[in-house]
Image (tube, grey):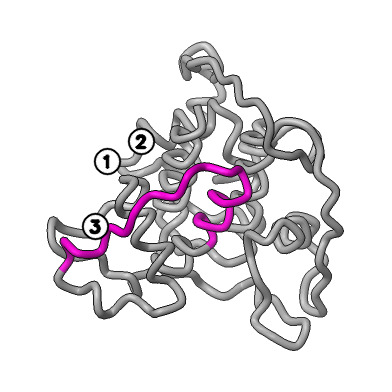
Amino acid sequence: MKKLISLLLCGAMLVGSAAAFTFEPLDTDQVLSTELKEEIAAQGAPSAWAADEVDAAIAAGLVPHLTDEPGYQDIITREQFAELAVCAALEMLDGEIHIPPASFSDTNNPSVEKAAGMGIVNGVGEGVFNPKAATNREQIAAMLYRAWDLIEIPAASQGLEAYTDSASVSSWAADAVGAMAASGIMKGTSNTTLSPADPCTVEQAILLVYRLYQEVK
């Protein structure tokens, strides 16, 4: 996810409200030039299992330039996920909402402030966001669940029963992980495990955001 993805920044970072949603299917071959595809490949490619959805997410305008320019297989930080979540939320929302951005003592990243103002992300206490901290699967699920609520998608029912490690999901994340699993947005790490404490990579986060976008389309 290098500088070139800044060419694919979401349009103006205007905060919008949930209203009408109209999306046309996007052909990534038409949206991405051959030159740009070659540049993306040269600077690091997503894993084969993730490539199609990552390309579709980029073409849909869901992937901004991320702070610190991580590779697709790097663990996504709280700051980077806030940037990704705000870009995707604004792409999915239509109109305007007026939510004052939150402020933190350890970051002035406008995407973090907007994501916190929207209620998608929270600080860690005492006015601190801890932007460089790594994320895990249940933390990402919780942030996606808040975005889900923001864009007013009907919540899916709990989906933890099928997993043998459901007891390892933190109580504060159970509703979020259950809803993401039930909807198919967050798939298990196997047929029977969710691995909620496992780290979440950049490409995994992009896929989760793209699948949420697919729910809105």
Q: Vertically, is 76 above or below 152? A: below
Q: Vertically, is 150 above or below 5? A: below
Residue 133: assigned label? none
Report the residue marked by disc 3: 188
Q: Nearer the viewer, residue 207 or 67?
A: 207
Q: Are marks 3 and 1 in contact (CB under 8 Å)?
A: no
Mark 3 or mark 1: whose residue is earlier in sequence: 1
Q: Nearer the viewer, residue 163 or 52?
A: 163
Q: Residue at x 48, y 52 (%)?
A: 71
Where's residue 212, x and y in %? 47, 42
Asked if residue 188 lies left or right of residue 185, the reply is: left
Q: Is residue 154 within the magenta segment?
A: yes
Report the span colored magenta.
143-163
Within-10-Å neighbours for mark 1: few <14, some 14–19, many 20+: few
Residue 51: assigned label? 2
Asked if residue 183 lies left or right of residue 67, the reply is: left
Question: Of helix, strand and loop, which one carries label 2?
Answer: helix
